[in-house]
Structures are given as structure tokens and as C-alpha cells.
Image (spheres, helix red, strand yellow):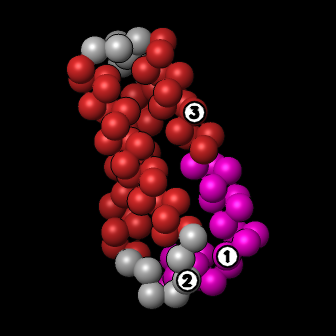
Amino acid sequence: MNELELTIISNARTALENVKNFYQRDVGADRDDYFKNLYALHALTKLAAEDSGMSADGVKALKKMELEHAAAFGAAVVENPTAMQVLGQ
């Protein structure tokens, strides 16, 4: 992977970790920060779904993060519904 791909993947990983941290918290978590990171994650992982010129390894890393996010969200809905209620406010 080239330096640009590594930067994209690093930024996506940071956004994913911040989103996952939100899912593990209770009421009082910062919704604005959650949405900022979620939208950043979606924007960056979208590069894997389009003909963006990313290498196969770059696409694989971003798709793995998409799956990791889906699993974390699903677990949060079941395990921490209070945090999920914060999103609806």
C-alpha cells in the first residue's frame, strides 16, 4: 500500500475506534462526536466500494473495518441499549 492508502486506513481505524468507544458508553456520551466519527468512517470506507484506485490490500482493510463496525453496532444494540437511546434524542 502507498502512503495515501495507509493514511486513509489509519484515519478510518481511528474513527472506528471512537465509534466503538461510544457504543460501550452509557448516557451522556457525546452524540456530535459520535456522528462526526461515524460519518468519517462511512466516507473513508466508501472508497473500498468504488473504483477508487485503491490496492486490493487497501480495499480489504477498509471492508474489514466495515464488518467490524457492523458487528460492534449489532452488539451495542443488544448489550447497551441505553447508549443507543442517546442517538434518538
Q: What element carries label 3?
A: helix
On screen, residue 24 above or below 36:
below
Q: Main secondary structure of the magenta part?
A: helix
The residue that disc 2 covers is 26
Identify which amino acid the numbered label 2 is placed on: Asp
Whole-percent x, y for residue 88 in the image: 54, 80
Task: Verify whether residue 75 appears in magenta.
Answer: yes
Confirm or deny contact between disc 1 and disc 2 (CB under 8 A): yes
Q: Residue at x 60, y 44 (%)?
A: 68
The residue that disc 1 covers is 80
Dividing the picture into quadrants, the one containing residue 33 is: bottom left
* First reached walking from the N terminus: tag 1 or tag 2: 2
Q: For the residue carrying disc 2, how many other residues have a C-alpha within 10 Å: few (<14), some (14-19), or many (20+)?
A: some
Quadrant placement of the N terminus: top left
The residue that disc 3 covers is 64
Whole-percent x, y for residue 38 in the image: 42, 56
**Viewer-proximal residue among 18 and 63:** 18
Dividing the picture into quadrants, the one containing residue 31 is: bottom left
